[in-house]
Amino acid sequence: MRLSRYFLPTLKEAPSDAQIVSHQLMLRAGMIKQEAAGIYAWLPLGLRVLNRIEQIVREEQERAGAVELLMPTLQLADLWRESGRYDAYGPEMLRITDRHERELLYGPTNEEMITDIFRGFVKSYKALPLNLFHIQWKFRDERRPRFGVMRGREFLMKDAYSFDIDEASARRAYNRMFVAYLNTFARMGLKAVPMRADTGPIGGDLSHEFIVLADTGESQVFCDKALVEMPAPGPDVDWNDLQAIVDGRTSLYAATEEMHDAAQFESQTAESDRLTARGIEVGHIFYFGTKYSAPMKAKVAGPDGQDTEVHMGSYGVGVSRLLGAIIEASHDDAGIIWPDAVAPFDVVVINLRANDPSVCEACEAAVDALEKAGKSVLYDDTDERPGGKFATADLIGIPWQLTIGPKGVAEGVVELKRRATGEKSTVALDAALEAIG
């Protein structure tokens, strides 16, 4: 992709109302544009990152056995009346009446709709266990939308819903999502700690939030330091027996401030192992039994032929919110530092003399070689001064910077910089390609 033909409206300064680093850098890097309070247009660079995050989430859901579908953004109010949540949910729900006076809502979550889909098609326990997920835009009319995509009104979310014949099976489904989330966030370069959490308006009696530690986090969290250093389980686990993995993490103290018990924290965790920090929620999982299946009559015939209300859980990941969380966890004074797995491009090739045919030829050859190696490339072929090009490359956070100028062409070398460390080396193009991988 040639930068001269790309749409990248970067800013030298962030607007004054951008309060946190991720919001400031997303605006400066030309990733988003605010259209209304808490509502953003996703510009090309931001959309590329959003799509990469979404794909990782999708792959890990499918690895854990979930099946993708897509539900509409608008839902019938009557479904929510069946569950008893329509009047209880509060002003965060955007209620709509269409031209035929039907009451609708812009979905903040999908427990009712997925239960309706399930009860319409699944009649026997033999179809269980079942986990259905989708990735969809949602809307919650926050009283005070702030912090950019971290607390917007419109947001992209992955939500999954499990259906099982009994509580034991449902808890196994919960464990699968617990482990899937650990793997998901690790692939994005994040250390996410599962913490006991309030179930809120979703309901139920078992819930964990997945928290990324960051100085600018929205809430205070308390945990055993060991949880931060635990590696992700990885894909090669026994998906049918995950209890030991879950127990290994939930046996250590970890709680959000809403669930924090100071006395328990002190008795359960050695003083040297106690960590108090700020955190950002990036995922939330719930087991809530028959909270929705009972009032909505979502039943299956059990092994004995008797109708049984299914046990359910729901599992959310804030896909758009994750961009903000990753930036909060990975940036410096110059700009964003994207982990390789979610970066909008793998490499930026910087042409230091755009009016020099030999330099342009060398840059074109480098771009061609990188693309043949399967790398996504942003080619800065603009006539901007070198200092401006370097500043833009650092700001947008591409993992590798490959710079070519007249001197390098004459000597047969390029300059390679790793954005995360700032390390630079002057090497032949083949050596640079090998280093980039």
Image (tube, grey):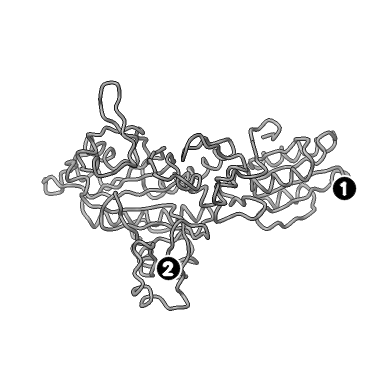
Write the residue at 58% across / 45% down. 16
Distance from disc 2 to disc 1, alpha carbons, whole Å, reads 54 Å
- Residue 75, given in percent of the width and then of the height, sits at 30, 33
- Residue nearest the viewer, comparing 183 with 17: 17
SS under mark 2: strand
Instruction: Give the quarter of the image for residue 167.
Output: bottom left
Q: Earlier in the sequence, mark 2 or mark 1?
A: 2
Q: Does residue 280 appear to the left or right of 170 in the view shown?
A: right
Q: Crowding at label 1, few (<14), some or many (≥20) Cα neighbours within 10 Å? A: few
- Quadrant of the rendering where the N terminus is positioned: top right
Q: Is residue 416 above or below residue 224?
A: above
Q: Which mark is residue 223?
A: 2
Q: Amino acid at mark 1?
A: Glu
Q: Residue furthest top?
A: 99
- Which one is nearer the viewer's eye here, 355 or 404? 355
Residue visible at 29% across and 49% down? 202
Label 1: element kind: helix
Mark 2, Cα crowd under 10 Å, few <14 / some 14-19 / many 20+, is many
Residue ID at (50%, 37%): 40
Q: Position of residue 339 (x, y in %)?
A: 58, 52
Quadrant of the image occupied by residue 107: top left
Q: Please state the horizontal and vertical placement of residue 160, each as a whole percent of the image.
A: 35, 45
Residue at numbered disc 1? 411
Q: Amino acid at mark 2?
A: Cys
Residue 261's x, y, as percent?
Answer: 34, 69
- Residue situated in front as seen by the camera: 266 or 317: 266
